Image (cartoon, rainbow, N blue to C red):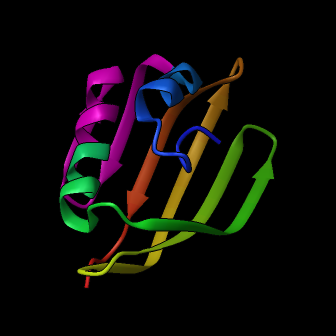
Amino acid sequence: MKRLQGDVEGDLSNYSQDVVMLTGSGEFRGHEGVMQCAGELDRIVGDAEFAYDTTMVSGEYGFLQWSASSGDAAVCDGADSFVVRDGLIVMQTVHYTPR
């Protein structure tokens, strides 16, 4: 779980070069988009501690419910969905509400 350890660049090996990410703040594409999306979350919650509360997989589809907290910010309703083909994430949705 490279992402849980804060290793976003290492986690890129799990993503297709052409990945599409859809979020409440817009669309992100490719590895650069993954980094931009992760950077946006980092700006919001900073050095937060993340917990993966629910993980579900059905064939090529995945769902992750998560939460994060730091001294200054928190997310209680994080939810990502994934489409995985040939071992790589080709599509991801990301939702969270910072507080």
The residue shown at (55%, 69%) is: 66
The image position of residue 67, as x and y in percent, is 50, 74
Q: Is residue 42 left or right of residue 31?
A: left
The image position of residue 69, as x and y in percent, is 40, 77
Where is 1 relative to 84, above or below? below
The residue shown at (26%, 23%) is: 32
Where is 98 relative to 41, above or below? below
Q: How many marks?
A: 0
Query: For residue 97, what is the image quadrant?
Result: bottom left
The image position of residue 75, as x and y in percent, is 38, 77
Where is 97 relative to 63, above or below? below
The residue shown at (23%, 80%) is: 72
Q: Is residue 33 left or right of residue 90?
A: left
Which of the two residues, 65 or 84, is positioned nearer the viewer here?
65
Where is 86 relative to 66, above or below? above
Q: Which contiguous range is marked in magenta?
A: 16-37
> In the rendered view of the protein, which quadrant contains the C terminus?
bottom left
Q: Is residue 96 left or right of residue 45?
A: right
Q: Is residue 24 left or right of residue 76?
A: left
> In the rendered view of the protein, which quadrant contains the N terminus?
top right
The image position of residue 51, as x and y in percent, is 59, 68
23 in the magenta segment: yes
Which of the two residues, 47 or 87, is positioned nearer the viewer here?
47
The residue shown at (40%, 56%) is: 94
